[in-house]
Amino acid sequence: MGIGPVPAIRGLLKKNKLELKDIDLFDINEAFAPQFLSVSKELGLDNNKTNVNGGAIALGHPLGASGTRITANLVYELRRRNGRYAVGSACIGGGQGIAVLLERV
């Protein structure tokens, strides 16, 4: 675990021809606080757009359901804010990361 979400998010944005500034919301599923802080610092994330309702430490880290929690949170928050794009991400054991892009249409 660690900063695996960083290359996952960068790769996701590159594939979709987007930049960090195009994203309205981020939900970074933190395994522990320093992991999230490292990802946020490395990407230069805006605290006003990141884990706006709390992350896994505050809301819980449900075994086998983190992806559902991240996705549901982003869908509802995008709608509430009239945003367009959201990125959800999580670290995976062994230093890997995963990221998903949501678009409100």
Image (cartoon, helix red, strand yellow):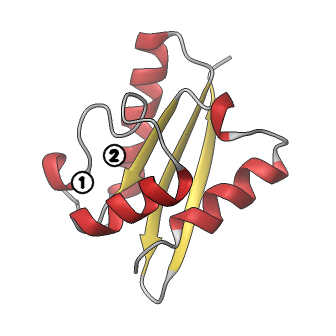
- Residue that lies at the very extreme toward the bottom in this rendered image: 94
Specify whether 15 is left or right of 85. right
Q: Residue at x 41, y 12 (%)?
A: 80
Q: Which residue is mark 1?
A: 56
Are discs 2 and 1 less than 8 Å apart at CB? yes
Specify whether 7 is left or right of 73. right
Specify whether 24 is left or right of 61. right
Task: Judge whether 2 appears above or below 78 on screen.
Answer: below
Q: Is residue 44 visible?
A: yes
Which quarter of the picture shows residue 30? bottom left
Q: Position of residue 24 (x, y in %)?
A: 55, 26
Q: Give the alpha-carbon distance from disc 2 to disc 1, as whole Å.
A: 9 Å
Within 10 Å of disc 2 (Cα), the crowding (few <14, some 14-19, many 20+) is some
Q: Quadrant of the N terminus?
A: bottom left
Q: Which residue is mark 2?
A: 69
Within 10 Å of disc 1 (Cα), the crowding (few <14, some 14-19, many 20+) is many
Q: Position of residue 53 (x, y in %)?
A: 25, 32
Going by the numbered disc 1, the residue's amino acid type is: Ala
Q: Nearer the viewer, residue 68 or 59?
A: 59
Query: Marks 2 and 1: which is nearer the front?
Result: 1
Number of labels in the image equals 2
Instruction: Label 2: state its secondary structure.
Output: helix
Q: Residue at x 45, y 61 (%)?
A: 39
Q: Residue at x 69, y 57 (%)?
A: 10
Q: Residue at x 23, y 68 (%)?
A: 32
Q: Position of residue 29 (x, y in %)?
A: 36, 56
Going by the numbered disc 2, the residue's amino acid type is: Arg
